[in-house]
C-alpha cells in the first residue's frame, strides 16, 4: 500500500448524496426512476467538471470529488442543489478542506472523513461545510455561509466547526443573523525579483475585497526591510533572489521579536529539502509560482488565520528524511526547562496527536493540554506545532518511523 502527500498544499473535499430516492420508484415506476437517477448522476458529475473539480468515485446516487478551490466547491454545491431542486430531488452535501494523503491513488485522512460525515449529517437539501471552507469561501460566493457551531463526527477525535451554506430563502429564517463582516483586510507583501510576477500577484490579490498588497520587494534585503516596516499579515517570499535569498530573508523576519508575519515561500520547482528548511525556520507554507489563483488566495487566507499549509504528517516525513537526530538536545535553549509533563506533551505533539488525543492519553482536560502546549512553545521559542515536530525529531526525542500512540 502506497501512501504519499497529494500535489499542492490544500484540497477541498466534497461528498454529495441523493436524499431518499426510493420515493421516485413509488411515484414513477422503476424504469422512469432509473432514467431520472441516470440524468441526475450525469448532471452532478458535469457540475463538478465545470467548476474545476475531479470526481474521485461515484457512490451510488452520489459522488466523492476534490477541488483545488474552496470557493469553487461551494459554488458547485449550490449549483448541484439548485439543479436537483428543479428536478424535484434533494441532495445532502458535505464539504471540508485540508491536506489529505493519497492511499493507492485516492485521497484519505481527516478532511475526507469530515466531508463524508458532514454529508451523512446533513438534512435533505442541506450543504454543510467545515470551518476552513467557510473562512475561505464566504467572502467570494453569492450565498451566505452561516456558522452552526461545533459538531462531533464519527471517526474524528475532536469536534468540527460546522457552517451551513444558505442557498434557499427558507434556510435563512432558521439561522441566526450573520455577524458583521470584518473591517480589517489581510495585508500582504510580495517579494520576488521578477517584476512581471510581482505585478501579476498584486493584480490577483488586490482584486479581493479582504486582501490588500501593502508592499513589494525585488530582493531579499528589501523584503526584510519592507516587512519590518509594514508588519504585514503575510509575505509571499521567492526562494531565489539576489542580495539575500528568500530562505535567509524569511529566517531573519521570523526571528525578529514582535513580528507575527506569516511567511509563504514561492518557488518554480518542488524540492523537499527546501520545504524542510522552510518549515524548520517557521514558514507557514510553500507554493509553486504557477499555482492557480484560487489556490494562491486560499493560501494567503489560511496563513493569515495562523494555520499551516503543510500538515504535521508531511512535516514528520520530511524531518525523518532530512533532519532526524541532527541536533544535540543539550544545545537547544529551553529544552532542559521543560517539566516531565511538558516533555510528555512534546513527545505526543511530535507523534501527531491532537490536543483531544493528548488529553485522553494523559487523562487530563483539554484546557490543561492547551496550557501545556502553550508553555512548551514559549519555553522553546517556537511559533507553532509544526516547529515543535521538527525540533523533536532533530534532537532525537522521537525516532524516525515511530507511529502515533494509541489511545
Image: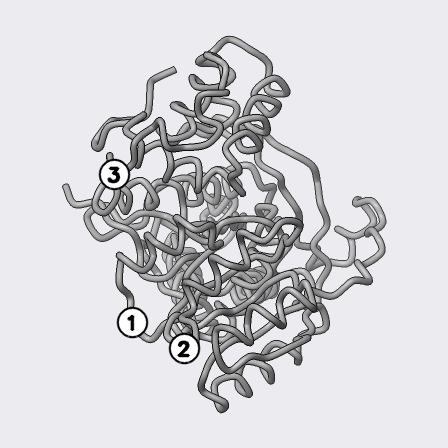
* Residue 122 located left or right of residue 174: left
Q: On screen, 249 above or below 15?
A: below
**Is disc 1 surrounded by few (<14), some (14 to 19) or many (20+) residues within 10 Å?**
few
First in sequence: mark 2 vs mark 1: 2
Whole-percent x, y for residue 388 in the image: 43, 36
> Which quarter of the image is occupied by the N terminus?
top left
* Mark 2 or mark 1, whichever is nearer to me: 2
Residue 24 in view (yes/no): no
Q: Name the residue carrying label 2.
A: 241
For marks 1 and 3, give the CA distance: 26 Å
In percent of the image, x 77 and y 58: which residue is there?
169
Whole-percent x, y for residue 130 in the image: 57, 46
In percent of the image, x 41 and y 61: which residue is there?
286
Q: Residue furthest left?
A: 1
Q: Residue furthest front?
A: 331
For marks 2 and 1, give the CA distance: 14 Å
In percent of the image, x 61 and y 41: which residue is there?
123
Rendered image quadrant of residue 137: bottom right
Q: Name the residue carrying label 1.
A: 269
Whole-percent x, y for residue 105 in the image: 22, 53
Q: On residue 326, which mark appears? A: 3
Residue 385 in view (yes/no): yes
Q: In the structure shown, which secondary structural element does the residue marked by tag 2 occupy? A: loop
> Which quarter of the image is occupied by the C terminus?
top left
For marks 3 and 2, give the CA distance: 28 Å
In percent of the image, x 80 and y 44: which residue is there?
174
Front-most of residues 202 and 21: 202
Whole-percent x, y for residue 301 in the image: 60, 60
Amino acid at each position: 500500500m502506497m501512501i504519499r502527500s497529494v500535489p499542492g498544499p490544500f484540497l477541498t473535499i466534497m461528498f454529495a448524496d441523493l436524499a431518499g430516492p426510493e420515493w421516485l420508484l413509488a411515484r414513477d415506476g422503476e424504469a422512469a426512476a432509473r432514467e431520472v437517477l441516470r440524468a441526475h448522476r450525469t448532471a452532478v458529475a458535469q457540475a463538478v467538471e465545470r467548476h474545476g473539480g475531479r470526481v474521485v468515485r461515484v457512490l451510488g446516487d452520489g459522488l466523492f470529488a476534490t477541488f483545488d478551490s474552496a470557493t469553487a466547491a461551494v459554488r458547485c454545491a449550490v449549483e448541484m442543489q439548485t439543479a436537483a431542486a428543479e428536478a424535484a430531488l434533494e441532495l445532502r452535501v458535505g464539504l471540508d478542506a485540508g491536506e489529505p494523503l493519497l492511499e493507492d491513488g485516492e485521497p484519505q485522512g481527516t478532511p475526507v472523513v469530515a466531508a463524508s460525515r458532514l454529508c451523512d449529517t446533513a438534512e435533505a437539501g442541506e450543504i454543510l461545510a467545515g470551518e476552513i471552507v467557510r473562512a475561505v469561501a464566504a467572502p467570494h460566493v453569492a450565498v451566505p455561509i452561516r456558522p452552526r457551531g461545533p459538531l462531533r463526527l464519527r471517526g474524528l477525535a475532536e469536534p468540527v466547526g460546522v457552517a451551513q451554506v444558505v442557498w434557499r430563502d427558507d434556510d435563512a429564517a432558521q439561522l441566526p443573523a450573520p455577524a458583521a463582516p470584518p473591517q480589517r483586510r489581510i495585508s500582504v507583501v510580495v517579494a520576488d525579483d521578477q517584476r512581471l510576477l510581482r505585478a501579476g500577484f498584486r493584480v490577483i490579490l488586490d482584486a479581493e475585497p479582504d486582501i490588500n498588497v501593502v508592499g513589494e520587494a525585488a530582493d531579499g534585503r528589501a523584503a526584510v526591510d519592507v516587512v519590518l516596516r509594514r508588519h504585514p499579515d503575510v509575505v509571499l517570499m521567492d526562494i531565489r533572489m539576489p542580495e539575500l535569498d528568500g530562505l535567509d530573508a524569511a529566517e531573519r523576519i521570523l526571528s525578529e521579536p514582535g513580528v507575527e508575519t506569516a511567511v509563504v515561500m514561492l518557488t518554480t520547482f518542488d524540492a523537499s529539502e527546501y520545504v524542510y528548511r522552510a518549515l524548520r525556520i517557521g514558514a507557514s507554507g510553500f507554493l509553486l509560482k504557477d499555482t492557480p489563483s484560487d489556490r494562491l488566495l486560499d493560501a494567503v487566507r489560511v496563513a493569515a488565520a495562523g494555520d499551516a499549509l503543510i500538515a504535521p504528517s508531511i512535516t514528520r516525513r520530511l524531518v525523518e528524511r532530512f533532519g532526524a537526530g541532527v541536533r544535540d538536545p543539550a544545545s537547544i535553549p529551553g529544552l532542559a526547562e521543560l517539566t516531565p509533563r511538558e516533555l510528555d506533551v512534546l513527545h505526543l505533539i511530535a507523534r501527531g496527536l491532537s490536543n483531544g488525543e493528548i488529553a485522553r492519553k494523559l487523562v487530563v482536560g483539554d484546557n490543561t493540554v492547551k496550557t501545556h502546549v502553550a508553555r512548551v512553545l514559549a519555553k522553546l521559542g517556537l511559533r507553532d506545532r509544526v516547529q515543535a515536530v521538527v525540533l523533536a525529531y532533530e534532537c532525537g526525542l522521537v525516532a524516525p518511523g515511530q507511529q502515533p500512540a494509541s489511545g
